Image (spheres, rainbow, N blue to C red):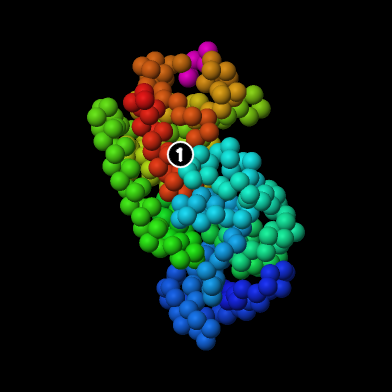
Amino acid sequence: MNKKYIWIPAMAGLLALGACSSSDTEESGSGEETGSGETTTVQGASGEVELEETPQNIVVLEWVYAEDLLALGVDPVGIADLEGYNQWVNVEPELPEDITDVGTRQEPNLEAIAQLEPDLIITASSRHEAISDQLNDIAPTVMFEPYPEEGEGDQYEEMETTFREIASAVDREDEADQVMEELDSSYEDVAAEISDGGYEGNEILLSQAFSANDTASIRLFTDNSMAVKIMQEIGLENAYDGEEFELYGYTETNVDALEPYQDSDFMYIVQEEDNVFENQLAGNDVWEGLNFVEEDRTYALPGDTWTFGGPLSAEVFAEQVSDALTGE
């Protein structure tokens, strides 16, 4: 049964003015008249949250939700792991210069969050379900889940659904429509570039690799991942047909697993200082004997390529894939 937190913004601080109800609302993101005005119902992974006013001071504890707000023209006041966001999430617009870092995503600083006097906290249930009560004591908290279980949709569908829920929370539904329309248009442009380059319909083995205990660990992205769904949007196919469902959208494996897919095009993400293909796999008979290596059909994406995120990151990723293939 879904929980529903009903919140009335007050003077800030740590007092929770919410009440719990076991009743479900038929539509998420919908408004309903109450004695004090119109409320907005936001559907999260842990239940519904009703907001009686549009939030003005929002703290986000996962990067993707900061990106979602920026796409809607809303600046969050606090974010977890600001340095990491700036390193990995390469989108415009950027975060405001005066945003406050509230600790790590793994262990956010509750005191720092409370000092910002937020009227909404947005995070992921898989990350912060254990501290949901403490967060709700500070401000109404909506938790989403970016990694759907098997049979509950893929990461791309979840990304769009969550983006629209956040848009509803901040009263920016029209802006959300425009962002998604612009994303679809950008896909069409990128697909045309890929087609003109002769790559339309190509099977891509998308990977991310790094060293672990001085051996090459290779992630192969599965069909439920956001990255693969974006590739499909721009006219490419996923070569990898992993047999098991992978919650996070990739299988972690080794170089031997690449052999069945050697007739596809190989696209990879590595850090410049940790290029396992030039280091650990240099001289490796399996690696150097793969058809896509011998035929020079390997394509490097930038080391800071972000395969998660929201619609802005999706547009950037699509362009990076096209640039890698076409050599631009």
The residue at 66%/27% (across/down) is: 213
The residue at 47%/58% (across/down) is: 162
Q: Quadrant of residue 238?
A: top left
Camera-side residue of 151 and 106: 106
- Magenta highlight on residue 284: yes
Camera-side residue of 285 and 197: 197
Locate residue 192 relative to residue 75 in the image: left or right.
left
Q: What span is colored magenta in the figure?
A: 283-287
Q: Please tell me how crowded label 1 is: few (under 14), some (14-19), or many (20+) other residues with Cα within 10 Å.
A: many
Residue 216: tell me if it is visible.
Answer: no
Locate residue 51 relative to residue 197 in the image: left or right.
right
* Whole-percent x, y for residue 148 in the image: 48, 55
- Magenta highlight on residue 240: no
Quadrant where the N terminus is found in the figure: bottom right
160 is higher (above) or lower (below) than 12:
above
Q: Residue furthest bottom?
A: 35
Residue 213: tell me if it is visible.
Answer: yes
Please name the residue that numbered disc 1 is placed on. Answer: 221
The residue at 58%/40% (across/down) is: 86
Quadrant where the C terminus is found in the figure: top left
* Whole-percent x, y for residue 290 in the image: 42, 20
Q: Amino acid at mark 1?
A: Phe
* Whole-percent x, y for residue 297 in the image: 37, 21
124 is higher (above) or lower (below) than 218:
below
* Dominant secondary structure of the residues highlighted in magenta in the image: helix
* Whole-percent x, y for residue 7 in the image: 60, 75
Q: Quadrant of residue 325?
A: top left
The residue at 52%/86% (across/down) is: 35
